[in-house]
Amino acid sequence: MAKQRILICGDRGMVGSALVRRLRGPAVEIIGANRAVVDLTRQAAVEEFIGDCRPDVIIVAAAKVGGIHANSHQPVPFLYDNLAIETHIIQAAHQADVDRLLFLGSSCMYPRAAAQPIVESALLSGPLEPTNQWYALAKIAGVMLCQAYRAQYGRRYISAIPTNLFGPGDNFHPENSHVPAALMRRFDAARRAGAASVAVWGSGRPRREFLHVDDLADACAFLLDHYDAAAPINVGRGSDITIADFAAMMAETVGFAGTIAFDPARPDGMPRRVLDVGALTALGWRARIPLAAGLADTYAWFQENRAGLRA
């Protein structure tokens, strides 16, 4: 039998790399789409690329991503670039008669005041969290576009909404990274410098859910085999932790023995964000990597690759 051709858009990012690790095998041919191969913000280039490679399945893991600081200071690329990337890929998939596509959204798509844990039906039920609204709006548009192609053309396009992710290959930029990577880099630097204290943005009271990226990749493979519906589906652990407790766990992971000083002048973001994963659990999938083990795995990768990380 011919190999199944799977196009992973964003195959060099944290999520894309995890997808490559999970899906690589004798029955699968992985095709990567990244900046070195094709400019996903250019419609003609994307249409030509997908038309030439003719994949059986497309996973849209490419995106302009970053933390609160990056979202607040770069609203145009977080909205425009992400809209361009997803619309070009999904339209080109349809034009090339690719009938199976998985679009990855983000838990920041949900309203700031959504009841917790957040169920999929909460989407579009209220105002967004202002600190990441530009990225959230683009991701919401991607989910709706998948639904539109399914409704009008019968395409088997699905959407998954992951919780906060971490793992090997994360962005460890000191200002533009998400919480796990930012804290890991900060605590590691403090340990190596012998610092007595580490500053952590915010009050430490918000609660967040964190999922190792390899668990997400496994969930994506599972969904491509077991899910085919218009509604997006949550992917997470279904449990959360305060930022203060998470920071303490991170300090222990990297071996930092000093104090943690929270800065309440910095924004907290949403007070709580944890996903209801009942729909995915009912299908038969659960996260398998414990938080502490996932952090240890990520820190080992970080230590091996520290020299090549952006300053």
Image: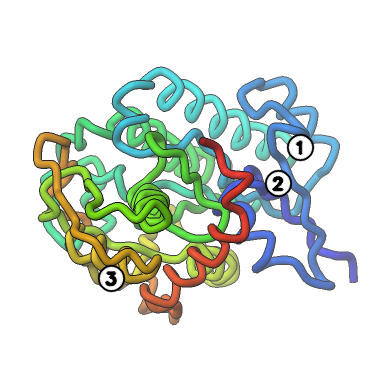
Question: Alpha-carbon distance for marks 1 and 3?
Answer: 36 Å
- Report the side of 119 relative to 115 (left or right): right
Mark 2: which secondary structure?
loop
Q: Look at the picture and state if 240 lies above or below 93.
A: below
Q: Earlier in the sequence, mark 2 or mark 3?
A: 2
Label 1 close to label 2 by CB (< 8 Å)? yes
The spot of residue 134 in percent (x, y) is: 33, 28
Amino acid residing under circle 2:
Val
Q: Secondary structure at mark 1?
A: helix
Q: Secondary structure at mark 3?
A: loop
Does 29 appear above or below 179? Answer: below
Q: Nearer the viewer, mark 1 or mark 2?
A: 1
**In this rendering, would 72 be left or right of 193?**
left
Question: Is residue 68 among the parts visible in the rendering?
Answer: yes
Please state which of residues 253 and 166 is positioned toward the viewer in this rendering. 253
If you read the primary sequence from the N terminus, does the residue marked by circle 1 or circle 3 appear first? 1
Q: Nearest the camera: 169 or 125?
A: 169
**Dividing the image into 4 quarters, which one contains the N terminus?**
bottom right
Q: In the image, which disc is placed on residue 98?
A: 2
The residue indicated by pointer 3 is 238
- Badge 1 amino acid: Ile
Rounded to the nearest whole Å, what is the CA distance between mark 1 and mark 2? 9 Å
Point 15% across, 39% down: residue: 126
x and y percent of residue 8 in the render? 67, 49
Q: Which residue is mark 1?
A: 50
Residue 161 seen in render: no
- Apparent side of residue 9 relative to residue 233 in the rendered image (left or right): right
Crowd band around label 3 with a 10 angstrom C-alpha radius: few (<14), some (14–19), many (20+): many
